[in-house]
Image (cartoon, rainbow, N blue to C red):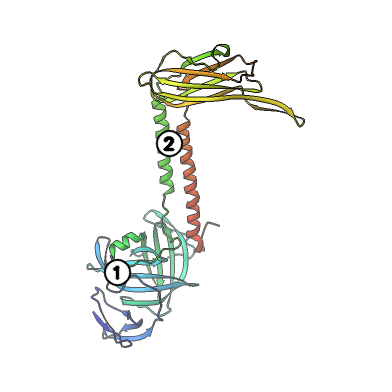
Amino acid sequence: MKIPCYDCNTETELEVGFEVVNFVCPNCRSLYVADDEGKFRRRSQFKAEYETIPLAIGDTGFLNGSQYKVTGILRKRVHPDYRWTEFILQNEAKEFLYLSLSNGHWMMLTEMEKIDDLKKRTKVLNYEGNDYDLFEHSDAEIVNAQGFFDFEIRVNKLAHLAEFINPPYIVSVEKMNNVQTAFHGEYVRKSEIKKAFPGITLPYQSGVSMIQPYRFDLRNTAVIFCLFALLIITANWYIYKDQVEQNVFNSTIKFSEFDNKEVTSPSFVLNGSSAPLTIKVSTGVNNSWANLNVALVNENTNDEIYANKDIEYYYGYSDGESWTEGSQSEKFNICGVKGGKYHLLITPMKAPEDLSNSEMQVSVVWNEPSNRNAWIVVIGMIVIFFIIRFFKNQFEKERWADSSYSTYE
């Protein structure tokens, strides 16, 4: 079909699969109406807008498994001055597809079968078993247009819109000239539009679209974290269920014999998976200090792991109050000790001036029951979940900020 514009002397040619009722010149925005003889007569003109539109009449793109071409473009506005662009597309099977662009966010919609007239107080719309929450009731006007249309459009003609959302989906109901039309749509990522229409320049995205999905599905994230937590706890139990606590060294060491001298323990065999080696030490320090140095020697590989601990205990009286600092006993670990044959090299030491302290008690235990690492991971997942939940709440607040029916303060 070829239609000339008498205002700007521009001819627009495009093969369309429908009867054209209205035509708007893409160059000067003059509105033409088909008369009874099929001739197009100029009725009025839309005011020129300087909004950059990424698609033009006649552009083709591959969407929903079919090649579509742009046949019409509408620019709409609701009070006070919120605007968006709608692209009408048609394929060779004469099926229509609609793209909506707002603040850089895209929606793809198709016309639904006729639905019952909406009641004014309808807050929740059920569609195919899913509830869609009312986002907005508004009166929209067409402020600009271009291309071919199979319906009547008028300059500044108001149409009533009711939009119900269940992100990433929407049901949009439009009532114009007492005719109600419903559309079902879903959010479309920029990458999909870019793939469908190679070479176009996409506008910058800002804000949150009314049906833009959050990066994380809160329910699925919770289920995944629960499954991982169960797996971690079960695996930890399974690995250590057959292991028993082994006392590998328990002795009282006299400072008179081994002060700053090495004590060699008997050899011992550890059977099982990796587990911490827990060393408990106590000594009668009194306003003084002592030290224990431990070397764990693997007799199969001659590898050595070292650890040491200071034991300090001080007390006094100052400014009318008694005070204490430190302790006469300490506990520390050598982590991740694998099964194998080992012995210990233990070196006790005390302050030379401490004459009252005569001995040190040392106890070494392998595989003391500990779920510390497993619970650290589980607690970490709980913290991450609540962080995701917090940002999800902020995301929803921004989504509903422009709605008159927001449940977020």
Which amino acid type corresponds to the residue marked 2 in the rendered image? Ala
Residue 20 place in picture, x, y as percent: 28, 78
Left or right: residue 268 versus residue 397 is left
Quarter occupied by residue 104:
bottom left
Examine the image and state in which quarter residue 231 appears.
top left
- Which quarter of the rendering shows the C terminus? bottom right
Name the quadrant containing residue 349.
Answer: top right
Disc 1 residue crowd, few under 14, some 14–19, many 20+, Cα 10 Å: many
Query: Mark 2: which secondary structure?
Result: helix
In front of the other: 333 or 88: 333
User: CA separation, marks 2 and 1?
Assistant: 49 Å
Q: Secondary structure at mark 1?
A: strand
Q: How many marks?
A: 2
Q: Is residue 80 left or right of residue 322?
A: left
In this figure, which residue is indicated by the disc labeled 2? 229
Task: Give the label on residue 133, or none.
Answer: none
Q: Earlier in the sequence, mark 2 or mark 1?
A: 1
Q: Nearer the viewer, mark 2 or mark 1?
A: 2
Disc ID at residue 89: 1
